[in-house]
């Protein structure tokens, strides 16, 4: 018994391979096995787009320099029969079926496919693996368009789409999926899944937002959430302590002010800005923040976002400033607004601070 036959018999004894209902094509010339499913397709389709299959089949043909030599060279055993197919490792039947669909589909069928995010995720992943570059690019563009629209999606598929965005290094799709995650976190949904995913993909800004959202849920939720590990809970306890202390000190630490060249009394301007910041951010009696909203001890992002809103309203004269900005040079106050926005920015601001304090 040949090595190929032996391997096939061993596999068949456990789980016999079946022919795919859609892509076991009668006049196909190459048989591929994925998991326990056989596909019979055309080699000419597999070699499109200078894919990995093109290189694989080309390596065989390169051994024969002329047609005569090629005709005399024995064909490779793999891929010519159900008993000895080309076996692809670490792929799923659904992924390979998605790839075959993209290669054989009619234009009208592709138009319908752009509304199926599950199929697009599968296609993008396997097209990336086998270097179908134009197919990968099409799937990523379609996914980005899908996630920039208010269409329904599952949390599981959103996780997979975020994975694909990182895998394929496609920032437009990553930005679109992160917007969806931020909305979910704001609604208190899928927080632990966001933590696990953002940690695995090293998305630190999103990780900071997810930890912050979980801190606001309280310890009873942390302890009962099945997705969180012991190390996650330890980080949350440590983060709760660190962020609570940071929030206590926040009124005493205003964002750094870059003085305008026309500001001649910088020391006084600095002191006036510090007083204004304390008035805005303090949750003590008389503070602007406490008059607007009550915050939890660890709601760092809420405090900073409120501060940005108040400073912006002062700068644009949307609310009366009273004596709050007395002593701050008018051009320096514009710098104060930029500094406050920097504190609330997602990559280096509140969520980044929250992430650093948790870790």
Image (cartoon, helix red, strand yellow):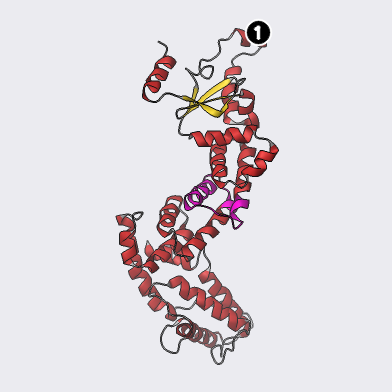
Q: At x 57% / y 56%, what residue is drawn?
A: 176
- Residue in the foreground of this view, choosing between 28 and 176: 28
Q: What span is in magenta?
A: 144-173
Q: At x 49% / y 33%, what residue is drawn?
A: 93
Magenta stretch: dominant SS?
A: helix
Magenta stretch: includes residue 166: yes
Q: Considering the image in quadrants, where does the N terminus appear?
A: top left
In the image, residue 266 above or below residue 29: below
Residue 47 appearing in the image: no
- Residue in the foreground of this view, choosing between 314 and 28: 28
Question: How many marks are shown on the rendered structure?
Answer: 1
Task: Decide if residue 290 is on the left or right side of residue 149.
Answer: left
Q: Quadrant of residue 325?
A: bottom right
In the image, residue 68 above or below residue 218: above
Q: Quadrant of residue 284?
A: bottom left
Q: Quadrant of residue 101?
A: top right
Q: In what element is the residue under mark 1?
A: helix
Q: Dot 1, crowdedness within 10 Å: few (<14), some or many (≥20)?
A: few
Extreme-front residue of the structure: 21
Q: At x 61% / y 79%, what residue is drawn?
A: 334
Q: Considering the image in quadrants, where does the C terminus appear?
A: bottom left
In the image, residue 306 above or below residue 202: below
Residue 3: x percent and y percent? Answer: 41, 15
Residue 102 appearing in the image: yes
In the image, residue 174 above or below residue 71: below
Residue 82: x percent and y percent? Answer: 50, 19
Magenta stretch: includes residue 129: no
Q: Which residue is mark 1?
A: 68
Q: At x 64% / y 43%, what residue is drawn?
A: 112
């Amino acid at each position: 018994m040949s090595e190929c036959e032996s391997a096939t018999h061993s596999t068949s004894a456990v789980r016999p391979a079946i022919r795919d209902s859609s892509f076991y094509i009668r006049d196909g010339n190459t048989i591929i096995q994925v998991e326990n499913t056989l596909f019979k397709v055309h080699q000419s389709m597999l070699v499109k787009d200078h894919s990995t299959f093109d290189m694989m089949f080309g390596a065989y043909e390169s051994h024969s320099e002329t047609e005569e030599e090629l005709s005399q060279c024995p064909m490779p055993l793999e891929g010519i029969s159900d008993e000895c197919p080309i076996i692809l490792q670490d792929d799923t039947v659904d992924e390979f079926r998605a790839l075959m669909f993209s290669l054989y589909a009619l234009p009208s069928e592709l138009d319908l496919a752009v509304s199926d995010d599950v199929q697009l995720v599968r296609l993008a992943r396997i097209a990336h693996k086998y270097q179908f570059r134009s197919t990968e690019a099409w799937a990523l563009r379609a996914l980005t368009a899908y996630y920039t629209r208010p269409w329904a999606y599952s949390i599981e598929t959103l996780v997979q789409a975020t994975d694909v965005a990182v895998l394929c290094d496609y920032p437009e799709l990553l930005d679109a999926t992160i917007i969806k995650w931020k909305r979910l976190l704001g609604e208190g949904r899928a927080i632990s899944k966001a933590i696990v995913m953002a940690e695995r993909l090293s998305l630190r800004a999103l990780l900071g937002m997810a930890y912050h959202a979980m801190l606001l849920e309280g310890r009873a939720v942390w302890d009962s959430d099945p997705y969180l590990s012991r190390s996650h809970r330890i980080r949350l306890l440590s983060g709760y302590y660190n962020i609570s202390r940071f929030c206590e000190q926040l009124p005493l630490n205003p964002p750094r002010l870059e003085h305008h060249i026309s500001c001649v009394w910088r020391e006084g301007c600095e002191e006036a800005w510090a007083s204004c910041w304390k008035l805005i951010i303090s949750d003590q009696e008389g503070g602007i923040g406490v008059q607007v909203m009550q915050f939890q001890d660890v709601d760092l992002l809420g405090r900073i976002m409120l501060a940005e809103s108040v400073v912006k309203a002062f700068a644009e004269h949307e609310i009366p400033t009273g004596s709050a900005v007395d002593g701050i040079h008018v051009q320096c106050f514009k710098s104060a607004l930029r500094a406050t926005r920097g504190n609330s920015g997602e990559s280096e601001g509140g969520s980044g601070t929250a992430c650093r304090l948790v870790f």
